């Protein structure tokens, strides 16, 4: 019992860490695509370095590799939508709207886990819809940011549910490495196509470097592995509900710094 409780403690630790991401997204000046590219590049590099130091195997079955790369695409799109939402609105609105992930998870998880929708999940979904209606009504100037946040929420719910299944087939470190590698590949292709003749656009201001390192190492490499690991014992819906505490943690962090 105490061992299972450990997973819940770790879950809230990473939610606290995720609370930094919105603030970092506002502090970092580069566009959303480049921000996500550096985030996953740093994350992949440090997980790979950890594998080399600890002699952790890079081997993964081809069937699982394909799944991780697909999830990586979802992760890339999720983060791009999330950070763009912050830049189009503000941290508070983006985080409030992304809480709609609970609604999406309550609909997606039963499909993949082959179970019925639970009544409390459905009721929670209704409450979220009502809440979002009021947010959209009073913050009409930030509609684009809110729409992007909801899209990010749907994508985040989808890959969280898929990871809830995938953790039964492999370990969290290997899953995270190849998912982030897949995300890196997708964003790299996009950036190469759109900025092929101007590599100066890949340069970032010196002031952004420390924030990107925190985002890539702490909020990506470490936090992402733990977020996958906890789903050995915790359902995707519970993970998403817990992550919805992120706005509270973000406000606390913003006040402290």
Image (cartoon, rainbow, N blue to C red):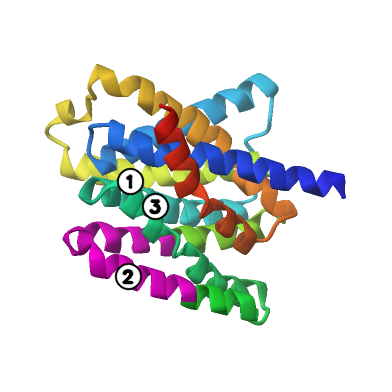
**1 or 2: mark nearer the eye:** 2
Q: Quadrant of residue 205?
A: top left
**2 or 3: mark nearer the eye:** 2
Tag 2 residue: 134
Q: Which residue reaches farthest left?
A: 197
Q: Say which mark, if any, is on residue 255.
A: none
Tag 1 residue: 91
N-terminal of the two: label 2 or label 3? 3
* Magenta stretch contains residue 137: yes
Whether residue 110 sits left or right of residue 245 in the image: it is right
User: Considering only vertical position in the picture, is 129 above or below 195?
Assistant: below
Q: Which residues are magenta?
A: 127-154
Give percent across and percent down for residue 166: 64, 56
Give percent across and percent down for residue 189: 29, 44
* Magenta stretch contains residue 125: no
- In whole angstroms, how far apart are the C-alphas of marks 2 and 3? 15 Å
Residue shown at 48% from the left, 47% from the top:
248
Q: Quadrant of residue 169?
A: bottom right
Give percent across and percent down for residue 183: 42, 46
Whether residue 96 sits left or right of residue 57 in the image: it is left
- Residue 1 in view here: yes
- Dot 2 crowding, Cα within 10 Å, few <14, some 14–19, many 20+: few
- Dot 3 crowding, Cα within 10 Å, few <14, some 14–19, many 20+: many
């Amino acid at each position: 019992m105490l061992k299972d409780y450990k997973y819940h403690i770790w879950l809230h630790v990473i939610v606290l860490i995720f609370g930094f991401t919105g603030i970092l997204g506002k502090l970092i000046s580069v566009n959303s695509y480049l921000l996500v590219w550096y985030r996953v590049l740093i994350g992949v590099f440090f997980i790979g370095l950890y594998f080399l130091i600890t002699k952790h195997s890079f081997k993964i079955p081809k069937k699982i590799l394909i799944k991780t790369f697909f999830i990586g695409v979802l992760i890339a799109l999720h983060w791009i939508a999330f950070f763009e939402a912050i830049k189009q609105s503000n941290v508070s609105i983006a985080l409030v709207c992304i809480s709609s992930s609970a609604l999406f998870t309550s609909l997606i998880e039963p499909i993949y886990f082959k179970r019925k929708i639970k009544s409390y999940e459905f009721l929670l979904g209704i409450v979220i819809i009502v809440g979002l209606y009021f947010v959209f009504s009073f913050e009409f100037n930030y509609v684009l940011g809110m729409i992007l946040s909801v899209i990010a929420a749907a994508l985040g719910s989808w890959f969280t549910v898929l990871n809830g299944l995938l953790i039964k087939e492999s370990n969290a470190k290997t899953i995270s490495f190849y998912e982030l590698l897949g995300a890196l590949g997708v964003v790299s292709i996009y950036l190469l196509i759109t900025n092929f003749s101007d590599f100066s656009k890949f340069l970032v201001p010196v002031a952004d470097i420390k924030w990107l390192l925190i985002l890539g190492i702490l909020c990506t490499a470490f936090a992402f592995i733990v977020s996958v690991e906890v789903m050995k014992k915790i359902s995707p819906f519970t993970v998403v509900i817990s992550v919805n505490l992120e706005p509270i943690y973000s406000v606390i962090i913003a006040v402290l710094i």
